[in-house]
Image (tube, grey):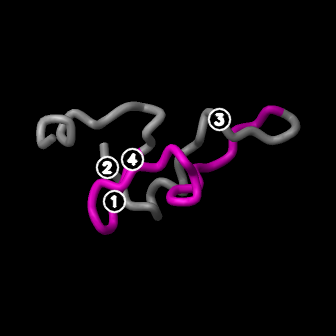
Amino acid sequence: MPVSEKEAKFKYCPLLTTHDDKLKFCQGTMCMMWRAAGPDAGYCGLAGRPEGLAAKN
């Protein structure tokens, strides 16, 4: 599900944790797993391609 980077910044990342094992928020375009899905949208590449995008390519 592609989301805007603003929306992504309020979702938890399973790879980013604090020193006491609490989850941190998504870093959006600052993360190597972030995949662009348009000019203002993207998704986490760790989760795989969203179904709607996979059908286009």
Q: Amino acid at mark 3?
A: Leu
Describe residue 56's horizontal placement relative to residue 53 as left or right: left
- Amino acid marked by disc 2: Pro
- Judged from the image, the secondary structure of the residue bearing numbered disc 3 is strand
Q: Mark 1 touching mark 4, by CB under 8 A?
A: yes
* Discs 4, 2 touching: Cβ within 8 Å: yes
Question: Could you give the CA–CA distance between mark 1 and mark 2, rounded to whole angstroms?
Answer: 6 Å
15 lies above or below 24: above
Residue depicted at 46% across the width and 64% down the height: 6
Label 3 neighbourhood size at 10 Å, few (<14), some (14-19), many (20+)? few
**Residue named by callout 4:** 43
Query: Where is residue 15 shown, x and y percent of the image?
Result: 65, 35
Residue 20, quarter of the rendered image: top right
Q: Amino acid at mark 1?
A: Ala
Q: Secondary structure at mark 4?
A: strand
**Of callouts 3 and 2, which one flags the residue occurring earlier in the amino acid sequence?**
2
Secondary structure, mark 1, is loop
Give the magenta-colored segment's residue range: 21-43
Q: Earlier in the sequence, mark 3 or mark 1?
A: 3
**Alpha carbon of mark 4 to alpha carbon of mark 2: how far?**
5 Å
User: Which residue is under mark 3?
Assistant: 15
Q: Position of residue 13 (x, y in %)?
A: 59, 40
Query: Residue under circle 1?
Result: 41
Looking at the rendered image, the quarter that the C terminus falls into is top left
Residue sticking out furthest to the right? 19
Q: CA distance from mark 1 to mark 4?
A: 7 Å
Residue at left offset 47%, top offset 49%: 34
Mark 4 and mark 2 lie on one chain; the one further toward the N terminus is 2
Image spot of residue 54 (x, y percent):
20, 36
